[in-house]
Structures are given as C-alpha cells and as structure tokens.
Image (tube, grey):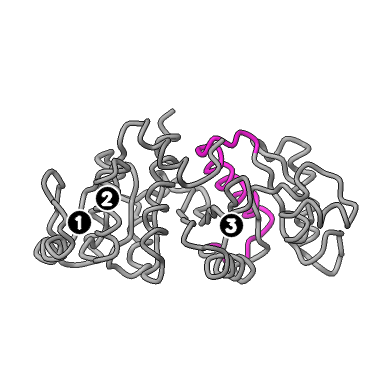
C-alpha cells in the first residue's frame, strides 16, 4: 500500500507515462507544475490555450517545450472543450484546469459530445500525507458535492474507494464523520452513517469497510476511540473521511492544509471517464504536482 507522496512518485516512475491535457494552459503556476512533472518523469502534457502566452511563460520558466503538443485556442471556454476532447478520444489520460473559470471547465467535462460524463456522480477527493500518520488520508467532499443524499454518499464512498485502490489500499477503512459517534434521530448525518454501515455489511457497498457514525477524533486517533470504548477496525484507523456536507468537508480540508504541513496534499475529481484535476490558484506548487501524480496513478489503475 502506498503511504506517502514520495511513494506515489516512485510508483509512477515504474509505470508507462500518462499524458495530461491542460485547458487554458497559459497559467504560470500550472506550467511550472507541468514542467516539474515532465522533468521528473511523472507525466507528459498536451497544452491547449493561447500559444503565444504559453511560449512566453515557458521562456520565463526556462521550460523546454520540445516534444509538447500545443493546440492554439485563445478562448478559455473553447480550450476547455478541446482539452476534454483530447481525453475523451484517448489522446490524453487526464484533464487539468488552467486559466479558465471553473464553471466553463466543468461544462466541458460534462459536455455530451466531447466531455467525460459517465452518468456517475462526480466528486472531489482530497488526499493528505501528514506525519505522523502511517497512511494517506482521504477527505471527501470538500469542494464539489454540497449536501449529499444517502444515495450520493454511496457515490462519494465509491469514488474515494476507487482512488484508494489505485494507491494500493485494497480495503480502505471508511468513516462517515458526524459531530458524535452515536445515532441521534435529530442528527440526520448519524442516521445516514448507520445506514451506510449496514449497506456495507449487506454487500451493497463493496471494496472497503464502512463504520459510523464516528466523530473526527475517534476516526483518526486510536486513543480517542479507546477512551470512547469504540472497538472496531475503522475506529482510530480511518483512511477515508466521508464528510456530512461541503461546509464540513471544506473546513476540514483547509484546516489541515493550513495547519498540518498542508503542502503535502493533492486532490482530484473522480467519477468522470478519466481523472480531472481542478486546482485553485491559491494551491501551492506542491499541491498541483501532487494532484497530477494522483491523477496519473488513478489513470493507470483504470487501464488494468
């Protein structure tokens, strides 16, 4: 099982190199990350966007564009469609957002003709590599799915489990996170957590072990679980933290990012026909590289 981003990078170098199609690639931070990934054997790229600007930025970065296909399109929305088409036609393995607004980018992802829609729920999975934990921690969904229904929570779990599998975790432990670890009829998230646990036991959710409700402390810390007398393999050992809604997920994601050596994180959208990388301009260089690396491993797992 892969337990750190260093191990992610090492694993990628053992596999056939994947190609990322970048929409509106005339973005300094994104091109810097692409340059690093190419130089270090993590991924190749197809750049779609304003060719003059791409070349100018590349010159400033001392980035060698030799061997990189550049598709000239100055309109960001159109570049997103062209980049998505590179993936849907098999010319690239994953899609990345550059200097295009998120709405236009996601419209391209969901385009019926050239996009990556599958009919499955598309969700965001954040992955953290934080000492002293001996495993990668997955948080979903802090960016995309706002107020998931029970059915959508099943989709959230399935997508996060699929990413965990690509990282070599054959049976990830999933904790539906609530404010308390007991079922309370006045707290709908606890009712969903109980139902998800039963669905997992009944074989309706597979490839993982689900147990909840759990509060964040007794999902991540064995001692906290012990004090609450919670005896279950997931308690204190969770790999995947299923958050009740986007406020909880976003707060947890950003709290970890900004207080716990958060540069060791990345995140991708799962549920489309290929991994999708939607980084923020506020994300660090390391987070962008880590996200590309996660997408590359997820893409490699798809073709097995």
Secondary element at image label 3: strand
Q: Nearer the viewer, residue 135 or 72?
A: 135
**Does the magenta-highlighted stretch encompass residue 66?**
no
Residue position for label 2: 21
Tag 2 near tag 1, CB within 8 Å? yes
Whichever of labels 3 and 1 marks the residue nearer the N terminus, that label is 1
Q: Which residue lies furthest to the front in this view?
A: 132
The residue that appears at 49% across and 57% down in the rendered structure is 265
Q: Quadrant of residue 165?
A: top right
Q: How far apart are marks 3 and 1 (CA)?
A: 29 Å
Residue position for label 1: 48
Residue position for label 3: 140
Q: Quadrant of residue 56?
A: bottom left
The residue that appears at 12% across and 58% down in the rendered structure is 72
Q: Main secondary structure of the magenta part?
A: helix
Q: In this view, does 46 lie to the left or right of 84?
A: left
The residue that appears at 27% across and 50% down in the rendered structure is 21
Whichever of labels 2 and 3 marks the residue nearer the N terminus, that label is 2
**Which residues are the magenta region?**
144-171
Secondary element at image label 1: strand
Residue 284: image x %, image y %?
Answer: 39, 65
Q: Distance between the residues labelled 2 and 3?
A: 24 Å
Counting other residues with Cα less than 10 Å from the Cα at mark 3, is it few (<14), some (14-19), or many (20 or more)?
Answer: many
Q: Residue furthest top?
A: 304
**Does the magenta-highlighted stretch encompass residue 167?**
yes
Residue 87: image x %, image y %?
Answer: 30, 45
Secondary element at image label 2: strand
């Amino acid at each position: 099982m892969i337990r750190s981003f260093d191990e992610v990078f090492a694993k990628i170098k053992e596999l056939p190199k994947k190609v990322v199609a970048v929409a509106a690639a005339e973005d300094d931070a994104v091109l810097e990350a692409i340059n690093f990934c190419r130089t270090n054997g993590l991924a190749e790229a197809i750049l779609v966007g304003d060719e003059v600007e791409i070349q100018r930025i590349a010159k400033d970065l001392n980035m060698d564009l030799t061997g990189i296909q550049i598709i000239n399109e100055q309109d960001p929305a159109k570049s997103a469609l062209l980049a998505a088409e590179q993936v849907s036609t098999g010319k690239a393995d994953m899609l990345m957002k550059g200097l295009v607004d998120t709405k236009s980018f996601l419209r391209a992802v969901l385009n019926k003709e050239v996009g990556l829609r599958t009919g499955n729920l598309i969700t965001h999975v954040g992955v953290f590599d934080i000492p002293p934990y001996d495993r990668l921690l997955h948080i979903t969904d802090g960016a995309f799915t706002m107020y998931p229904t029970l059915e959508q929570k099943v989709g959230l779990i399935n997508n996060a489990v699929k990413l965990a599998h690509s990282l070599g975790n054959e049976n990830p432990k999933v904790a539906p996170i609530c404010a308390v670890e007991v079922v309370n009829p006045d707290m709908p998230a606890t009712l969903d957590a109980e139902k998800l646990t039963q669905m997992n036991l009944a074989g309706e959710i597979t490839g993982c072990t689900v147990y909840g409700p759990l509060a964040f402390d007794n999902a991540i810390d064995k001692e906290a679980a012990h004090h609450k007398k919670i005896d279950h393999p997931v308690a204190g050992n969770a790999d995947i933290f299923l958050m009740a809604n986007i406020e909880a997920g976003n707060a947890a994601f950003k709290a970890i990012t900004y207080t716990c050596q958060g540069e060791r994180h990345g995140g991708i959208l799962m549920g489309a026909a290929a991994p999708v990388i939607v980084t923020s301009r506020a994300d660090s260089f390391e987070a962008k590289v880590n996200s590309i690396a996660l997408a590359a491993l997820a893409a490699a797992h798809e073709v097995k």
